[in-house]
Amino acid sequence: MIEEGRALFLQIAESVEDAIVDGSLTEESQAPSTNELASFYRINPATAAKGIAMLVDKGVLYKRRGIGMFVAPGARATLLAERRSAFADRYVQPLLAEARKLGLGPEELAQLVRERASAPVAASASEGRA
Amino acid sequence: MMTTPTETVIEVAGLTKRYRDTVAVDDVSFAIEKDRIYGLLGRNGAGKTTVMSILTAQNFATSGDVRVFGQHPYENAKVLRRMCFVRESQRYPDDALPSHAFATARLFFPRWNQELADRLVADFQLPMRKRIKKLSRGQLSAVGVIIGIASRAEITFFDEPYLGLDAVARQIFYDRLLEDYTEAPRTVILSSHLIDEVANLIERVLVIDRGRILMNEETDAVRDRAANIVGETAAVEAFVRGREVIHRESLGHVSSVTVLGALTDDDRREVAASGLDIAPVSLQQLIVRTTQHANGEHPSTQEGALR
């Protein structure tokens, strides 16, 4: 769940963002509290608080006094835009580097992507990273 | 981003402790902030226990100044009652039962929580009718851990409190400590060799080596400070040129080089384009390597298994 070598507060912020992107945490719903995050991920609450603070700064979460943190309206669209623009760097670039190593050209790669996209779910799931 | 104002509970200035011809603590200065969890990390003999003993007035400084809650701790009952020192080699009276130890602690620590102590006894399955002398090493450690958590002392020191505790019991310790810290914030100074086990728990790392402070900063800031660059030796060397290298290992044509400094997005692209991999460096690896590096132990041509 938590990986080594990356700031924890970023990973905590990302975990909340993931939930917003995949729709399990909807806009205007209450986000997990600092203490809930700290005890779930077994981390220092100050670190979890820093992750939450970052999301507030970013406008993804907002605070309702005396109640807690809530997902801001428009948060999902913002995060989707951000993730789409990072998609090429994070996923396509390494894919191209590995394909080049194996002598697969862009056309063959595109063909593979199309095949996989239309293949039954079970086949592609076994390739997924844990 | 943390907006809570910081308050200092411990101040150490120019602290030195000499035993005959060895210097255990060498002109050390640092401050401990209120309600944070610190990891006091370092090799055996680095000076961790000596520092904690001096802070809790169980040992004397050769020179330097130590203030706890703004006061000198020596023979200062007011200050001492606000601190709890759980040490690895804690001694108890010969015929004492765990319940005697807890009763004493209850009298001594003003914020002692009996309900919590009872719950911890159950969690650690501590036999209450057995004399402390007859307890196993792990059960003895559990007595200390229970006192440490249930005392809710404003400053709590745990000096390698886990001896003899198995993985399950250690996880109980970490979980209960974090839980109760959340409920009743306090300053915790946790000395441990099991760095990766406590890495997510500690807000700040204080690394001591040969009696000197090597690192005193936020754990999260340290986490992405180093990375292992792994791959074909020539490509790895090309990438790390001009960077601060703290460790090198190679096996045949493959090298793993630990570089300091967070990697930028451009760095990551370059690494990917060169067919290299980035392997994360755990907090434990980083501290081990930093300590070796500081000591000039520079195994630059070390052959060995890649980790």
Image (cartoon, grey):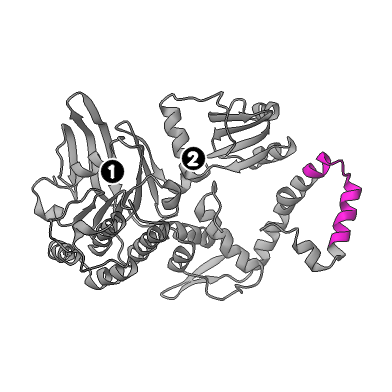
Across and down, in percent, residue B218 comes to: 42, 46
| In this rendering, the label closer to the viewer, 1 or 2 | 2
On screen, residue A106 above or below B170: above
For mark 1, name the chain. Answer: B
Quarter of the image with the N terminus of chain A is bottom right
Residue linked to disc 1: B31
Across and down, in percent, residue A82 comes to: 67, 57
Q: Residue at x 73, y 37 (%)?
A: B275
The type of residue carrying mark 1 is: Ala
Between A48 and B20, the residue placed more toward the observer is B20
Q: Which residues are magenta?
A: A97-116
Q: Residue at x 41, y 75 (%)?
A: A66
In magenta stretch: residue A111 = yes
Across and down, in percent, residue B211 comes to: 29, 32
Between A50 and B110, the residue placed more toward the observer is B110
Is B301 positioned to the left or the right of B143 in the image?
right
